[in-house]
Image: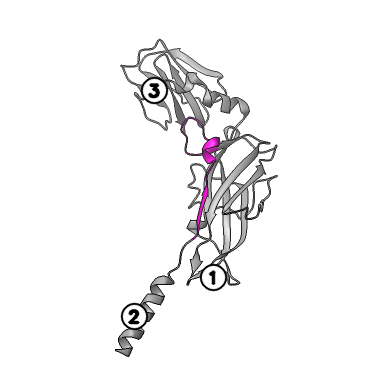
Amino acid sequence: MKRITLLLVLICATTFAQDVAPTFSWTNQGSYKYNGESNVTFKPGDVVSITLNYTLGSTGGVANTLDFILCGLQDEAMANVDPDTGTWANVPAPGATFAYPGGGTGGVVTFNYTIPAGTVLNSADANLTYRMLIYLAYKKGGGATTYGGPNANAIKLTKIRSAAEISTLGTADFSKQKLSSFYPNPVKDIITIGSDVETKTYKVLSLTGAVLKEVPATGTLNVSDLASGTYILSTDAGNAKIIKE
């Protein structure tokens, strides 16, 4: 009986001493998204307000403690990189710094982060990729070793755009109608546009709204002369973003 009782005590102690992982989220990132994009967008020189919600959890029944929170814009010359699995140097983008905002109050911290005024626009370099790294470092059970991990970071693919580019993304003319009857996308040379698209011309616009190409509607559009990048395909029936490889 004593052995059974001791075993039950050990089981109960183990049950109630399970590790609780930290949680971490960037709660207001939706304020910096345009036209339903999954990435966030900033302008050079923006002072970005960031709000984080977090819990520290516990290890072996002992509360974890906060070490630091880090925030910084990073860049790498990697087209279409996955911000979670890509290889990133542990340094901020040129002109940027890492910020350490502190822990805030009650698991909520709000702080400002400045995008360097000289940050290169994505439209100026098709291979340039940015991410906003926000990271929580903690000590397990109040110990001395610093930890992080998948539950303690908010990594977000980031676009750096001009005010004109952002204005174009947000205008009604580009968002009220979505053109879907065309392929392929991304495209190297020729776009085929569906016969159901009723339009007199096809236009290719830059993200700033400049007309780069305008041709009669014939069912196909040759874009082989365009540089690699993102453009707007505009018709009388609707608009769509296209990626030129």
Q: Earlier in the sequence, mark 1 or mark 3?
A: 1
Whether the magenta-drawn stretch holds residue 26 is answered as yes
Magenta-tinted stretch? 22-40
Tag 3: amino acid: Leu
Residue designated by label 2: 8
Q: Secondary structure at mark 1?
A: helix
Residue hosting label 3: 179
Residue contact at pointers 1 and 3, CB within 8 angstroms: no
Which element is circle 2 on?
helix
Report the amino acid beneath label 2. Answer: Leu
Residue 135: x, y in percent?
57, 54
How far apart, in angstroms, are the residues tagged by discs 1 and 3? 54 Å
Observer-nearest of 115 and 9: 9
Q: Quadrant of residue 1?
A: bottom left
Q: Is residue 167 above or below residue 114?
A: above
Q: Residues within 10 Å of mark 1 (few under 14, many from 20)?
A: some
Residue at x 46% of width, y 33% of height? 36
Q: Nearer the viewer, residue 95 or 170?
A: 170
